[in-house]
């Protein structure tokens, strides 16, 4: 049986060309980019060229890109780095209730150091309100961190609008664009953000590499100390092969991007329609429009997440729980809890389907059949 992978929001298969690029670098370009000799210079030029390609993909300058170990470190560095650098100007941070844990836990750690954090609520579709944001903003706000697209339900927040509201304000604006990167337009000058987090493994690149965009003249206190790599903002020898693989993945993601977006949007519709045609009751968590193209979160009343996941895996379909409820307990910081409240059944029975490069219409149809069969069995 051929397994079907519908968990691209968790991670995506590494593209063959990315593997090839990395293999060549590992075999032939093993020098340390900080060395003066030819081996070092050769590694340095790989890092420089990759950085330049990656920077261009978001309309940034090369020197505004800091390579990190992934989305988690980028989020941590943005939040802790800005908070510490601008502490003298205020102690208030604004974020939302539906951020990735890399943001939520970083913010929580700052509370212990005297910062105050406002968590913006979301409506039943996962959207924040501009009015709530305006009310939360204070003179002493030094950082606003709001994710671009949510990994669990796909909701996209009004980043550009918020950036405009912050134009004449001292607060630095960070967005976690880990899920949006590669599929949506993320030109940083158009968006108006000061910091933006990205991870390579969501776009068919290697794991353990990402970047943080930091707008020129934004101060950032480093989290790691050592050499002078990454403009003294992140010490340590660069992961040269992964950086080269990351640049390759960015290049691949840009090919036929509009077609991919259209295809994933079609897959979402197809999955929902196929399930409905089989008389399966479902609700969509989040919105179909104003959403990440590849993420679809559905609740199936009367089912339980663990049985769904195990049964689907046994039938060859890999999906994610997408639910706040795993191992019998509810995660109070989960996006579905923020959307519906802890008591809602939808918090317990949701499944996240997320599409990627190699998925086909046939796979989506087969996944709908499998899902329908299991939902019918569990709700009988
Ligand atoms: N932010 C978001 C929105 C994510 O989806 C993820 C990955 N689940 C991360 C941050 C963390 O990225 P990484 O796995 O590269 O640390």
Image (cartoon, grey):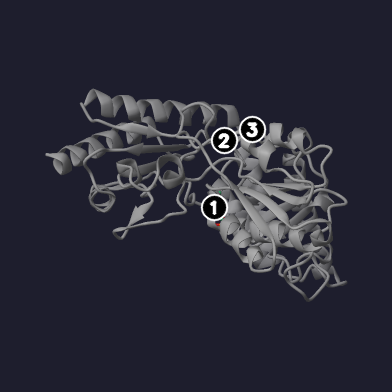
Identify which residue is drawn at 84% across, 61% down: 88
The one nearer the camera, 115 or 299, is: 115
Identify which residue is drawn at 64% across, 55% down: 117
Q: Earlier in the sequence, mark 2 or mark 1?
A: 1
Drawn side of residue 364 relative to residue 249, left or right: left
Q: Which residue is mark 3?
A: 131
Q: Which residue is mark 1?
A: 100
Residue 114 in the image, given as x and y percentages of width and height: 70, 65
Residue 376 in the image, given as x and y percentages of width and height: 16, 37
Identify which residue is drawn at 47% across, 53% down: 333
Q: Which element is circle 2 on?
A: loop
Residue 304 in the image, given as x and y percentages of width and height: 25, 48
At label 1, counting other C-alpha atoms closer than 10 Å, the crowd grade (few under 14, some 14-19, many 20 or more) is many
Badge 3 vs badge 2, beta-carbon distance below 8 Å: no
Quarter of the image containing the C terminus? top left
Looking at the image, the residue that sits furthest to the bottom is 226
Callout count: 3
Drawn side of residue 81 relative to residue 306, left or right: right
Disc 1 Cβ-to-ligand 1 distance below 8 Å: yes
Residue 257 sits above or below residue 52 on the image? above
At label 3, counting other C-alpha atoms closer than 10 Å, the crowd grade (few under 14, some 14-19, many 20 or more) is few
Disc 2 Cβ-to-ligand 1 distance below 8 Å: no
Residue 115 sits above or below residue 354 on the image? below
Q: CA distance from mark 1 to mark 3?
A: 23 Å
At label 2, counting other C-alpha atoms closer than 10 Å, the crowd grade (few under 14, some 14-19, many 20 or more) is many
Q: Is residue 256 visible?
A: no
Drawn side of residue 96 relative to residue 212, left or right: left
Residue 288 in the image, given as x and y percentages of width and height: 46, 28
Q: Which residue is mark 2?
A: 156
> Which is closer to the viewer, label 3 or label 2?
3
């Amino acid at each position: 049986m051929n397994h079907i992978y519908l968990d691209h929001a968790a991670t995506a298969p590494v593209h063959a060309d990315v593997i090839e690029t990395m293999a060549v670098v590992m075999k032939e370009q093993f020098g340390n980019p900080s060395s003066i000799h030819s081996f070092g210079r050769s590694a340095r030029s790989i890092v420089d060229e990759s950085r330049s390609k990656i920077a261009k993909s978001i309309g940034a300058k090369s020197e505004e890109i800091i390579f990190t170990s992934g989305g988690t470190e980028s989020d941590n560095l943005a939040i802790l780095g800005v908070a510490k650098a601008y502490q003298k100007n205020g102690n208030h941070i604004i974020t939302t209730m539906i951020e990735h844990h890399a943001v939520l836990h970083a913010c929580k750690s700052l509370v212990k150091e005297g910062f105050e954090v406002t968590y913006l609520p979301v409506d039943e579709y996962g959207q924040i309100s501009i009015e709530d944001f305006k009310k939360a903003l204070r003179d002493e706000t030094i950082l606003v961190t709001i994710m671009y697209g949510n990994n669990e339900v796909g909701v996209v927040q009004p980043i550009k609008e918020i950036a405009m509201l912050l134009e004449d304000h001292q607060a630095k604006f960070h967005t976690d664009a880990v899920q949006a990167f590669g599929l949506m337009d993320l030109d940083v000058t158009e968006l108006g953000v000061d910091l933006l987090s990205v991870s390579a493994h969501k776009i068919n690149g290697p794991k353990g590499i990402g970047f943080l965009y930091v707008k020129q003249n934004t101060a950032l206190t480093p989290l790691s100390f050592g050499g002078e790599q990454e403009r003294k903002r992140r010490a340590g020898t660069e992961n040269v092969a992964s950086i080269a693989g990351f640049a390759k993945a960015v290049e691949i993601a840009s090919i036929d991007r509009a077609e991919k977006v259209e295809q994933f949007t079609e897959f979402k519709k197809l999955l929902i329609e196929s399930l409905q045609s089989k008389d399966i009751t479902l609700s969509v968590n989040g919105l179909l429009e104003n959403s990440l193209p590849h993420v679809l979160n559905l609740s199936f009343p009367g089912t339980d997440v663990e049985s769904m996941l195990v049964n689907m895996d046994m039938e060859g379909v890999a999906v994610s729980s997408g639910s706040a409820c795993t191992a019998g307990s509810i995660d109070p910081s989960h996006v579905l809890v923020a959307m519906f409240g802890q008591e809602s059944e939808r918090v317990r029975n949701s499944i996240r389907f997320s599409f990627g490069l190699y998925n086909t219409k046939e796979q989506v149809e087969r996944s709908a059949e499998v899902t329908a069969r299991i939902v019918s069995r569990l709700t009988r």
